[in-house]
Structure formats: C-alpha cells, structure tokens
Image (cartoon, rainbow, N blue to C red):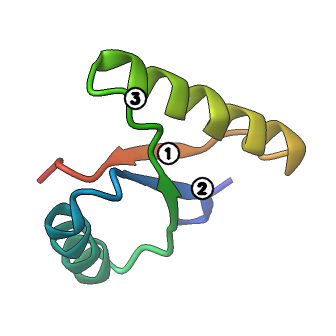
Amino acid sequence: MKFNEIPKFVVNLERRPDRLEHIKKEMEYIGWDYEIFKAIDTNSYMGITRSILEIIKIAKEQKYPRVMVIEDDCS
C-alpha cells in the first residue's frame, strides 16, 4: 500500500470548529483525502483514547491493513 493510499482519519472535537477549519486547510495543502471522525469528548485524555479505539473498529470493519489518525490540533 502506498503512503497516499492509507486511509486518514482526522479526529475533531465538535466544540472546536476552529481546529477543524485549520486542519482542513492543512490537509488540502498536502493533498490528502481524509475522513472526519467526531471525537468522543470526555474533557480528558480518555476522549482521544476512546476515539482511536473506535477508528480501529472502523478500520477492522473496512478491512484496512493500516490507517493514519490525525488530531485536529496538529500542525
């Protein structure tokens, strides 16, 4: 699988549309296709942990050999 073919999931807290707009611009600049995953919001580190576990479930269901998880606040 080529790097550009790896499915990419952007994890976004719905209460942070500002972060979503920023990461959308970054992803467009890079030229990557991606899917937005609505983060599980627990106001703690457990939110991202649970979100990633849900993405892993999706990857298994879709039979993806690998995925890339990108948090909305990376830059």
Which is more toward the observer, 6 or 41? 41
Q: Residues within 10 Å of mark 2 (few under 14, many from 20)?
A: some
Between marks 3 and 1 in the image, the one whose residue lies nearer the viewer: 3
Q: Which residue is mark 3?
A: 48
Q: Is residue 65 left or right of residue 68?
A: right
Q: Secondary structure at mark 1?
A: strand
- Classify residue 26 by image quadrant: bottom left
Q: Is residue 54 left or right of residue 68?
A: right
Tell me if residue 75 comes above or below residue 41 in the rendering: below
Which residue is located at x 75 percent, y 44 percent?
A: 58
Per the model, the C-alpha gap separating discs 2 and 1 is 7 Å
| Image position, residue 1 (x, y; %) | 68, 53
Do the numbered discs 2 and 1 sit on residues whose CB atoms are within 8 Å? yes
* Viewer can see residue 22: yes
For marks 3 and 1, the one nearer the N-term is 3
Between marks 3 and 2 in the image, the one whose residue lies nearer the viewer: 3
Q: Is residue 43 left or right of residue 58?
A: left
Which is more toward the observer, 17 or 28? 17
Per the model, the C-alpha gap separating discs 3 and 1 is 14 Å
Labelled disc at residue 6: 2
Labelled disc at residue 68: 1
Q: Secondary structure at mark 2?
A: loop
